[in-house]
Image: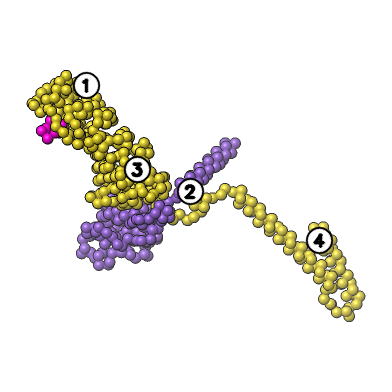
């Protein structure tokens, strides 16, 4: 848990960006947990909202944290950008305990962010949001020509792929040769 | 370099001389350096500058040579990695492709080999495919709605072949219907039937039987074949060719023009192919079937008589027999049962 502790210490001055103050009132029986992304900004999320994520839900049920422990040890998601985690947390809060609508208009339209979101959501195992995101990704190329699809999704052509593979092989070969030479030098 | 040193020595000598002159004639004011002196000093500075520049150029060239000698880094790797389609795992890619319709999948299939394999892996189910021979077009239906209509009239031949191949490669069908007599199909189908990928359909319906249907059948997977024979096509030759194809399971032959002889050819051929238990052969005649004559032809292989219209025949495999049911409406149903 050292990484978590580091995250907490660095994120200590940061205010929880989500969940209104009233939600944390003692009379509310709901428990809250804390998560942070690459930017170490801690987000306060209710257990109900976190149920969307199979990964976090599993972590919560296995750890059995009290509220204080949860506050002291926010779940670290170092591979997720802060703004992306914010989006996910917002979505989870919006859809807390609600049936998920067939369409979600709040998803980002920028392709870079969308792919980031897909990767993050897949990692956090939020099934409904992943379905929306994948649909959004598919919609990006609807009715487009093969060339346009290649451009939008940045799909490398077979020639480009082959060239990249050749380069990778060359590099691997050279690295291996360098290692063997170094090993031989050490042996001497 | 030696020239420069000589010059410096000379300058030093001149300076010494000047000092001596000033000592001897102190009234003479210190004048500006002579023109010769200036020129010499300027030349000296210039030479130094040139030398420095030369050194710098040599250094630069050496650096460039060093860089050229170094391994070239591909442009792609130099770029800051941007999140895109390629960052997704194959599982996620498939999840996205699921939301694409047939046209978009066909287009995505053309982008790269990896994407083609993904699209092919994720089969697209179509209820019905109609191939019209005489009108030279193909129509695919899903939930009763036409989702893809292709006409072969003006498109280039390679493109026709590629499209047809792609459709067969990525689609599964409930029904594949060769609606018009296949002999009239565009020559593209003649070529295609030779290189056709496996047809994933539950039923293949053909109005007629030709070399094209025969070749397509050979490439097909297990499904029910339905043939609607036209009057002229119900010759004994056609029927023999029909039963010589690989009939393992279910076959329905409709509109057979004929009677006992035609029926005998079909059933005999079917028995020879040794279909598994539970297989069906359904034959519908246009004409009249003489039940007595019909069963009389199979007298040698009778195993059990259930009634006037229902009998069991022996098969080459002793563990199986064929139950034949003849109806008054000119239909014959054969089922392979356990003995």
What residue is rendered at 48% in x and 45% in y?
A162
B306 or B44: nearer the viewer? B306
Q: Residues within 10 Å of mark 4 (few under 14, many from 20)?
A: few
* Percent position of residue A174, x then y: 54, 42
Front position among marks 1 and 3: 3
Q: Which residue is mark 1?
A: B316
Name the subunit of mark 3. Answer: B
Query: What's the CA distance linking mark 4 and mark 2?
Result: 58 Å
Q: What is the letter of the yellow chain?
A: B
Query: What's the CA distance linking mark 4 and mark 1?
Result: 114 Å
Q: Quadrant of the C terminus of chain B?
A: top left
* A182 vs B22: above or below: above
Front position among marks 2 and 1: 1
* Percent position of residue B119, x then y: 35, 46
* B338 vs B174: above or below: above
Query: What's the CA distance linking mark 2 and mark 1?
Result: 59 Å
Q: Quadrant of residue B16?
A: bottom right
Q: Residues within 10 Å of mark 1 (few under 14, many from 20)?
A: few
Q: Earlier in the sequence, mark 4 or mark 1?
A: 4
Marks 4/1 same chain: yes
Left or right of A181 on screen, residue A89: left
Q: Which residue is mark 2?
A: A160
What residue is rendered at 27% in x and 35% in y?
B209
Marks 3/2 same chain: no
Query: Colour in which chain A is shown?
Result: purple
Left or right of B142 on screen, residue B75: right
Marks 4/2 same chain: no
Q: Which residue is mark 3?
A: B186
Name the subunit of mark 4. Answer: B
Front position among marks 4 and 2: 2
Q: Is residue B203 magenta?
A: no
Q: Are marks 4 and 2 in contact (CB under 8 Å)?
A: no
């Amino acid at each position: 848990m050292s990484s978590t502790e580091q995250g907490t210490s660095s994120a200590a001055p940061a205010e929880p960006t989500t969940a209104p103050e009233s939600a944390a009132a003692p009379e509310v029986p709901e428990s809250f947990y804390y998560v942070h992304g690459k930017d170490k900004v801690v987000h306060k999320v209710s257990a109900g909202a976190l149920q969307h994520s199979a990964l976090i839900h599993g972590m919560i049920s296995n750890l059995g944290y009290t509220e204080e422990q949860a506050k002291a040890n926010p779940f670290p998601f170092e591979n997720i950008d802060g703004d992306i985690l914010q989006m996910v947390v917002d979505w989870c809060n919006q859809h807390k305990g609600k049936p998920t609508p067939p369409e979600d208009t709040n998803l980002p339209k920028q392709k870079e962010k969308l792919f980031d979101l897909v990767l993050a959501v897949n990692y956090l195992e939020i099934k409904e949001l992943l379905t929306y995101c994948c649909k959004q990704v598919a919609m990006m190329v609807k009715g487009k020509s093969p060339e346009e699809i290649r451009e939008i999704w940045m799909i490398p052509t077979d020639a480009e792929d082959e060239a990249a593979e050749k380069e990778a092989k060359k590099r691997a070969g050279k690295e291996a040769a360098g290692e063997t030479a170094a090993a031989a030098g050490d042996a001497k | 370099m030696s020239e420069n040193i000589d010059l410096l020595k000379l300058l030093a000598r001149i300076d010494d001389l000047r000092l001596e002159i000033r000592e001897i004639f102190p009234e003479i004011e210190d004048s500006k350096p002579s023109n010769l002196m200036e020129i010499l000093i300027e030349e000296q500075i210039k030479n130094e500058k040139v030398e420095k520049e030369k050194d710098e150029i040599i250094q630069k060239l050496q650096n460039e040579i060093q860089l050229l000698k170094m391994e070239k880094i591909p442009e792609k790797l130099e770029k800051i990695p941007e999140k895109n389609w390629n960052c997704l795992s194959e599982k996620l890619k498939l999840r996205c492709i699921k939301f694409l319709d047939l046209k978009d999948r066909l287009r995505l299939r053309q982008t790269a080999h990896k994407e083609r394999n993904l699209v092919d892996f994720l089969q697209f189910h179509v209820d019905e495919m109609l191939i019209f021979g005489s009108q030279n077009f193909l129509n695919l239906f899903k939930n009763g709605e036409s989702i893809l209509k292709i006409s072969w009239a003006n498109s280039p031949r390679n493109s026709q072949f590629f499209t047809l191949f792609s459709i067969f490669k990525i689609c599964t069908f409930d029904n594949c219907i060769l609606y018009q007599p296949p002999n009239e199909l565009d020559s593209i189908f003649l070529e295609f039937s030779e290189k056709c990928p496996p047809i994933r359909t539950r039923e293949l319906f053909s109005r007629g039987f030709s070399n094209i249907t025969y070749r397509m059948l050979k490439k097909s997977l297990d499904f029910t074949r339905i043939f609607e024979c036209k009057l002229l096509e119900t010759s004994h030759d056609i029927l023999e060719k029909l039963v010589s194809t690989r009939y393992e399971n279910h076959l329905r032959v409709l509109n057979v023009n004929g009677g006992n002889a035609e029926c005998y050819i079909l059933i005999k051929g079917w028995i020879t192919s040794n279909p598994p238990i539970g297989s069906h052969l359904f034959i519908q005649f246009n004409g009249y079937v003489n039940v007595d004559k019909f069963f009389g032809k199979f007298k040698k292989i009778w195993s059990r008589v259930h009634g006037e219209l229902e009998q069991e025949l022996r098969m080459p495999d002793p563990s199986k027999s064929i139950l034949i049911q003849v109806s008054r409406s000119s239909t014959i149903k054969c089922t392979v049962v356990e003995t």
